[in-house]
Image (spheres, rainbow, N blue to C red):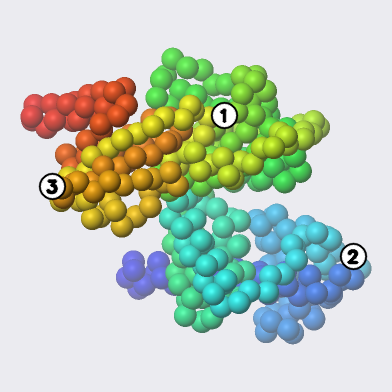
């Protein structure tokens, strides 16, 4: 068997196993008083031994709260959220959202795989097949146990409004900065399309201000007994409209850009930010206006346009972009 066939067979086995786990979990959920392993085996068409192996794996690998009593198996109350009844168009929207999430995550995410498997059960066959391909791709990503543990703690803390204690690697760009220990009130967990990462947005009790933490840089996390109430009038999801991507804890800045005629139509066909305003120029170029939180994220986007974009305002951002382009040009000229 060649490498491609072996890989395809391995991924197919992962899918079949995940789909079987879902069937077993669904049966358990439908029998709150428990059901025998033999009855489960009869319903899904496998051996009782396979069911026993699946039940153990579901508890150990997927963290499903499985219980056993006098030969009967069940799920603890609250293991599943209420089922969804979706129209085709709602399912399509959810499918697209799932695809975006898969593209923005570079980690092996057990919860993401489980959610995709469940989503595939309610989608039409054509969409379900694409979900299957997504699961295969995500399942082949190397596991990151630390990320999974941290993500689960943050999710539970956010859902229960519990303060979380974290250890944060603050020295990624500056090795002189030591690891930080702080307590955070989690307001939001947000995926980034710009950096293919997840971010925790919350109130840093040490800094006494709202901060954004990259989840991949959180080395450890634990829930504390302390709970918190949301800030009066705060709406984190709405406030994200200020950000270019996920950073909202920076002052609002007015940004004015000029895009050359070569890319003007491409710029105009997309709404890059909620505050965007465009002015078409007589030479075919377009001037872009917007107000965003800070320069860091939008600077990355501007640099991606290369020589086709020019910062007109503010002067500070113009200087930053110009310096970055000079450094890039010097690197190529030196060679």
Q: Marks 1 and 2, Cα distance to the nearest angstrom?
A: 47 Å
The residue positioned 47% from the left and 80% from the top of the image is: 126
Q: SS for tag 2?
A: strand
Drawn side of residue 268 relative to residue 48, left or right? left
Give the image location of residue 62, x and y in percent.
66, 57
Q: Is residue 93 above or below residue 230?
A: below
Residue 328 is situated, as x and y percent measured from the top left of the image, at 18, 30
Question: Which residue is denoted by mark 3 in the rendering?
Answer: 283
Earlier-in-chain disc, 1 versus 2: 2
Q: Residue at x 47, y 17 (%)?
A: 177
Measured Cα–Cα span from mark 1 to mark 3: 43 Å
Query: How far apart in space, not on screen, are marks 3 and 2 (Cα)?
Result: 78 Å
Seen as rendered, the residue at the extreme top is: 176
* In the depicted structure, whether residue 188 falls above or below residue 323: below
Instruction: Name the residue furthest front.
Output: 282
Tag 1 residue: 211
Q: Is 208 or 289 nearer to us in this picture?
A: 289
């Amino acid at each position: 068997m060649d490498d491609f066939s072996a890989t395809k067979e391995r991924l197919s086995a992962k899918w079949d196993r995940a789909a079987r786990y879902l069937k077993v979990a669904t049966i358990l959920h439908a029998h709150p008083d428990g059901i025998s392993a033999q009855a489960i085996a009869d319903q899904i068409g496998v051996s009782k031994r396979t069911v026993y192996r699946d039940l153990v794996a579901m508890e150990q690998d997927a963290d499903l709260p499985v219980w056993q009593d006098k030969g009967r198996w069940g799920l603890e109350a609250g293991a599943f959220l209420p089922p969804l009844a979706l129209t085709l168009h709602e399912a399509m929207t959810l499918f697209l959202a799932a695809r975006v999430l898969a593209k923005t995550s570079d980690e092996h995410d057990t919860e993401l795989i489980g959610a995709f498997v469940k989503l595939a059960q309610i989608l039409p066959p054509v969409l379900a097949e694409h979900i299957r391909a997504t699961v295969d791709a995500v399942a082949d990503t190397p596991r990151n146990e630390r990320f999974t543990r941290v993500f689960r703690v943050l999710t539970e803390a956010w859902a229960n409004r519990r303060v979380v204690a974290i250890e944060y690697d603050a020295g990624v760009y500056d090795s002189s900065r030591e690891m930080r220990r702080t307590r955070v009130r989690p307001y939001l967990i947000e995926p980034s399309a710009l950096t293919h990462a997840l971010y925790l947005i919350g109130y840093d009790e040490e800094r006494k201000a709202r901060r954004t933490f990259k989840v991949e840089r959180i080395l450890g996390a634990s829930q504390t007994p302390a709970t918190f109430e949301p800030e009066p009038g705060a709406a984190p999801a709405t406030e994200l409209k200020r950000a270019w991507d996920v950073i909202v804890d920076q002052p609002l800045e007015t940004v004015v850009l000029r895009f050359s005629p070569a890319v003007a139509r491409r710029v105009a066909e997309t709404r890059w930010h909620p505050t965007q305003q465009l002015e078409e120029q007589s030479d075919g170029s377009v001037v872009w206006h917007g107000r965003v939180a800070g320069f860091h994220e939008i600077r990355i986007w501007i640099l991606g346009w290369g020589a086709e974009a020019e910062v007109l305002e503010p002067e500070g951002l113009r200087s930053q972009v110009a310096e970055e382009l000079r450094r890039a040009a010097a690197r190529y000229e030196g060679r």
